């Protein structure tokens, strides 16, 4: 996608900045403490209700991951580990400090990769139904393999809120292009090993950032047991479930997710005081 096309296709309110060799698409909204919000497999557009809610309290920085939306994909990027380092560079470039980091689904995995490398700019983190640790073993699959199912089934399994029926042939070209880029990037970073970094489990003990793990009680993509296992690997992490909520927490219960983030931050501030 060339620069002119990316500018035309981007969601309202986004801007572009150069980070290393990546031209990054990022939405910045609100005023207050910086919050880096990392999207899931369906792109930054799906975060719109959560961004609106959080921007009343924070300055929300919501980028499209490299390869997603209108952001460049460098030839050197092949793993989520690469994206994690990239976002640490972004925080350095923007000189953001005392950052609240929040990531959901695929973005939660990216956030976890950042946390095991934390350069000190991230103060608190919230992971919403993240991928990243092993999604299956020889006997049990803990995370549904979205690549062997049709798109309609994955959409229905991803959220409790009824997913709208889409006729792809009726979508404007610019919307279809973004959807295809999101899907391609998800496959690039999540194909094999499936939606995980086998080494991440053995690195999560390095996380010193106070962390909250959120999970939808009706998540049909990643099981609650997977979520509990994830939280247990992060020293001192809290684990909270959200009723009436599937994997896409930001679609099913954006207000509850925003409140959980705000309450977690307030508790941390009170504890520090």
Image: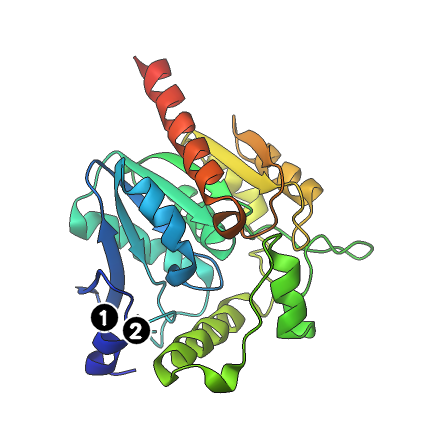
Quarter of the image where one finds residue 145: bottom right
* Image position, residue 216 (x, y; %): 60, 43
* Image position, residue 77 (x, y; %): 39, 69
Image side of residue 30 versus residue 202, left or right: left
Question: Vertically, is 230 above or below 187?
Answer: above
Image side of residue 149 versus residue 45, left or right: right
Q: Earlier in the sequence, mark 2 or mark 1?
A: 1
In the picture, the disc for residue 102 is none
Q: Pick whichever, 196 or 247, lies toward us.
A: 247
In the picture, the disc for residue 72 is 2
Which residue is depicted at the point 49% across and 33% down?
212
* Image position, residue 107 (x, y; %): 45, 54
Which residue is depicted at the point 38% across and 60% down?
44
Foreground mark, 2 or 1, reads: 2
Which residue is the site of mark 1?
A: 21
* Image position, residue 6 (x, y; %): 26, 76
Question: Vertically, is 67 above or below 14?
Answer: below
Q: Where does the N terminus fall, quadrant-wise? A: bottom left
Distance, label 2 to label 1, CA atoms, is 9 Å
Question: Vertically, is 251 above or below 186?
Answer: above
The residue furthest top is: 273
Label 1: few (<14), some (14–19) or many (≥20) C-alpha neighbours in 10 Å: few
Q: Pick whichever, 263 or 129, lies toward us.
A: 263
Q: Where does the C terminus fall, quadrant-wise? A: top left
Residue contact between numbered discs 2 and 1, judged by CB atoms under 8 Å: yes
Element carrying mark 2? loop
Element carrying mark 1? loop
Q: Pick whichever, 273 or 21, lies toward us.
A: 273
Quarter of the image where one finds residue 63: bottom left
Res. 244 in view: yes
Res. 118 in view: no
The residue furthest right is: 139
């Amino acid at each position: 996608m060339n620069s002119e096309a990316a500018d035309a296709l981007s969601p309202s309110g986004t801007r572009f900045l150069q980070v290393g060799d990546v031209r990054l698409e990022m939405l910045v909204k609100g005023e207050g403490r910086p919050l880096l919000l990392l999207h899931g497999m369906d792109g930054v557009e799906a975060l719109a209700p959560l961004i609106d809610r959080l921007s009343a309290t924070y300055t929300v920085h919501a980028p499209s991951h490299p390869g997603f939306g209108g952001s460049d994909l460098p030839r050197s990027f092949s793993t989520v580990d690469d994206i994690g380092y990239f976002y640490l560079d972004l925080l350095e470039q923007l000189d953001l400090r005392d950052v609240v980091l929040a990531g959901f689904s695929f973005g939660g995995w990216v956030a976890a990769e950042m946390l095991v490398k934390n350069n000190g700019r991230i103060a608190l983190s919230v992971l919403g139904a993240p991928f990243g640790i092993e999604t299956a073993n020889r006997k049990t699959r803990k995370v549904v393999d979205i690549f062997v199912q049709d798109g309609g089934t994955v959409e229905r399994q991803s959220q409790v809120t009824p997913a709208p029926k889409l006729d792809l042939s009726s979508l404007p070209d610019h919307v279809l292009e973004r959807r295809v880029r999101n899907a391609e990037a998800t496959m690039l970073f999540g194909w094999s090993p499936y939606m995980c970094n086998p080494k991440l489990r053995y690195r999560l003990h390095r996380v010193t950032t106070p962390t909250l793990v959120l999970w939808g009680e009706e998540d049909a993509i990643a099981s609650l047991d997977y979520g509990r296992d994830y939280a247990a690997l992060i020293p001192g992490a809290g684990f909270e479930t959200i009723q009436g909520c599937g994997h896409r927490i930001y679609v099913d219960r954006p207000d509850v997710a925003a409140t959980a983030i705000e309450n977690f931050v307030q508790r941390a501030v009170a504890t520090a005081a």
